Image: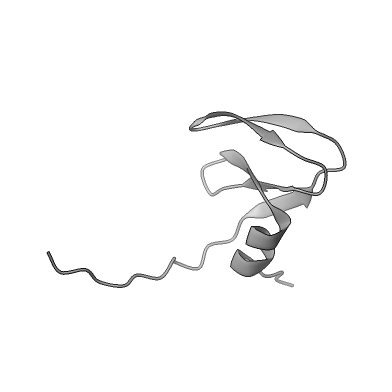
Amino acid sequence: MTTKQFRKKPIVVSAYRTDEIAFIETLEGTMKAEVGDWIVTGIKGEQYPVKPEIFLATYEAID
């Protein structure tokens, strides 16, 4: 089997940083967001929590 490399397509998502523990209903089930995690809303309206270090490595602000 030959593997190839892929890059995520540049898409725009909405996100906010939570200031309280939250339980988010995701496509994979309920996930717990800790204080300081980012809650991302994807292109189909789905939501999921992202840890701050992963968020900063994956997303950048746009104007």
What percent of the width, then of the height, locates residue 50? 65, 49
Quadrant holding the N terminus: bottom left
The residue most toward the right is 19
Q: In this view, does 20 lie to the left or right of 62?
A: right
What percent of the width, then of the height, locates residue 8? 44, 66
Q: Is residue 44 left or right of residue 17?
A: left
Q: In this view, does 7 lie above or below 18?
A: below
Q: In this view, does 20 lie to the left or right of 58?
A: right
Toward the viewer: 61 or 20?
20
What percent of the width, then of the height, locates residue 25? 61, 28
Toward the viewer: 22 or 9?
22
Toward the viewer: 53 or 42?
53
Q: How many labels does the image show?
A: 0
Q: In this view, does 24 lie to the left or right of 2?
A: right
Q: Is residue 9 above or below residue 48?
A: below
Q: Is residue 58 above or below residue 13?
A: below
What's the image's color scheme?
one colour
Q: Residue at x 25, y 71 (%)?
A: 4
State the image quarter where residue 49 is shown: top right
What percent of the width, then of the height, locates residue 43? 53, 49
Q: Which residue is drawn at 77% across and 50% down?
A: 16
Toward the viewer: 8 or 34?
34
Q: Which residue is drawn at 71% across and 52% down?
A: 15
State the image quarter where residue 63 is shown: bottom right
Q: Residue at x 21, y 68 (%)?
A: 3
The residue most toward the left is 1
